[in-house]
């Protein structure tokens, strides 16, 4: 949603009026023009934040929004790989360390049983700017902690 100049002005005006009312309620003393000016200053600080909030696209890239706390630059592509036949004792850090010598890793997710909390022996790694075919060739059928890994492109999750 795009925010127009008129919408920004209206938000500033509403914030200024609210600020004026609020300052009178808490008995801040001063001439009315000074209180209005302070309210307008406050709205001038808040309005750009509100405008930027509303101007962000509602059609975000799924992979970027999924990793917003740790997202790489937008020019970087992220691909997800399925990694099967993982040792049950392996944790995310060990899997990441195994792949990280040759591939830039965004994240590692190892699947667990909901009831028992035990690992299921497979997971997903998100690779940054990697040649997926070369990565699969390099790591598929490789041995990690005495287990032969199966590495494939991850399939999109199907929701019914």
Image (cartoon, helix red, strand yellow):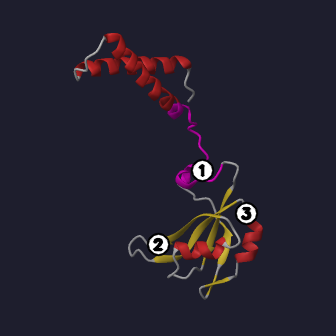
> Above or below — where is 148 with respect to 64?
below
The residue carrying mark 2 is 112
> Above or below — where is 10 with respect to 95?
above
Q: Find the magenta span and give its range.
A: 52-73
Label 1 sits on a secondary structure element that is helix
- Residue 44 falls left or right of residue 77: left
Residue drawn where x is 52% and y is 53% of the image: 69
Instruction: In this rendered view, identify the residue nearer to me: 130 or 157.
Output: 130
Query: Residue 148 in the image: x percent, y percent?
Result: 65, 84
Query: Residue 39 in the image: x percent, y percent?
Result: 38, 20
Number of residue marks: 3
The residue carrying mark 1 is 64
- State yes or no: residue 60 in magenta: yes
Say which quadrant the N terminus sits in. Answer: top right
Label 3 sits on a secondary structure element that is loop
Label 2 sits on a secondary structure element that is strand
Asked if disc 3 and disc 1 are in contact, CB closer than 8 Å, the reply is: no
The residue carrying mark 3 is 130
Query: Residue 88 in the image: x percent, y percent?
Result: 51, 81
CA gap, disc 1 and disc 2: 24 Å
- State yes or no: residue 139 in magenta: no
Residue drawn where x is 53% and y is 32% of the image: 52
Q: Specify the label residue 135 is tagged with.
A: none
Instruction: Write down the quadrant of residue 94 in the picture.
Output: bottom right
Residue drawn where x is 25% and y is 17% of the image: 29
Residue drawn where x is 73% and y is 70% of the image: 135
Going from N to C along the chain, the mark reached first, 2 or 3, is 2
């Amino acid at each position: 949603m795009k925010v127009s100049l008129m919408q920004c002005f209206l938000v500033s005006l509403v914030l200024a009026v609210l600020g004026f009312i609020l300052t009178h309620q808490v008995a801040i003393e001063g001439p009315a023009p000074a209180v209005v000016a302070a309210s307008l200053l406050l709205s001038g600080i808040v309005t750009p934040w509100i405008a930027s909030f509303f101007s962000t696209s509602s059609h975000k890239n799924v992979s970027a929004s999924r990793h917003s706390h740790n997202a790489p630059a937008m020019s970087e592509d992220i691909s997800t790989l399925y990694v099967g036949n993982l040792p049950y004792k392996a944790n995310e850090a060990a899997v990441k360390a195994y792949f990280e010598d040759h591939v830039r890793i965004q994240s590692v997710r190892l699947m667990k049983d909901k009831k028992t909390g035990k690992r299921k022996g497979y997971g997903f790694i998100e690779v940054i700017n990697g040649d997926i075919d070369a990565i699969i060739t390099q790591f598929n059928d490789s041995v990690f902690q005495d287990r032969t890994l199966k590495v494939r492109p991850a399939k999109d999750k199907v929701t019914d």
